[in-house]
Image (cartoon, grey):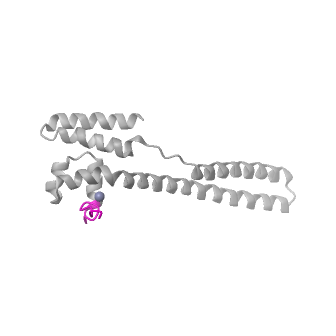
Amino acid sequence: MPRTCTICTHPSREALDRALVGGASNRSLASLYDVSEAAIRRHASNHLPETLAKAKDAEEVAEADDLLADVRDLQARTLAILEAAEGIRQHRTALSAIREARKNLELLAKLIGRLDDRPVVNVLVSPQWLELRAVIVGALDNHPDAQGAVLKALEGAGNAT
Ligand SMILES: [Zn+2]
C-alpha cells in the first residue's frame, strides 16, 4: 500500500516546494514545518520533479498561448484592412495587407508547431539529478558555509545551461 506523503498533503506544500527548489536544507525545513527530514528527502526526490516539470510546461504553454492570441489579433486586423482596401479598389494596399496576412499565418504555423512538439528535456528537474543534489546538499547540513557555497555553484551551473 502506498504511503501518503506528508509533504504532498501538507497545507504549506507550495511554500515547502519553493523553499526546496531555492535550496533550503531538509533539516531547516523539517523543523520549520514540523515534518520529518526523511519525508522531505523522499518528497524532494520522488514528487518534486514531477511538480516542477508540470509547472514549467504550464508556463511555456501560457507564454505560447499569449503569443498566439496576439498574432491572431494581428491577423484579424490585417484582414479587416484587406477587406476595406478591396472595397475601395486600393489594390496596392490590398496587396501589402495580403503580404502581412501571409507573414502572420507563417508565424501562427510556427507557434502552433512549437506548442505541439515541445521536447521538455531539462536535466535540472530530472529525479536523478534532484536526488543527487539533495544528497550533496544534505551531506553539508553541518557546514553551512560550505553548503552555501555549493548551492551558489549549483545555481550558477543551472543558469549556464
Ligand atoms: Zn510528496
70, above or below 135, in the image: below
Question: Quadrant for ligand 1?
Answer: bottom left
Q: Is residue 57 within the magenta segment?
A: no
Tell which of 81 and 65 is nearer to you.
65
Q: Quadrant of residue 85?
A: bottom right
Tell which of 52 and 103 is nearer to you.
52
Kindly identify the residue that appears in the image at 69 percent across and 59 percent down. Answer: 77
Which quadrant: the C terminus?
A: top left
Kindly identify the residue that appears in the image at 25 percent across and 62 percent down. Answer: 12
Tell which of 121 and 58 is nearer to you.
121
Where residue 127 appears, as percent x and y from the top left, is 35, 46
Which quadrant: the N terminus?
A: bottom left
Where residue 95 appears, as percent x and y from the top left, is 82, 50
Give, as a single range, the part of the protein colored magenta: 1-13
Q: Is residue 2 within the magenta segment?
A: yes
Where residue 106 appears, as percent x and y from the top left, is 69, 48
> Main SS of the magenta segment?
loop
Where residue 26 appears, as percent x and y from the top left, is 20, 49
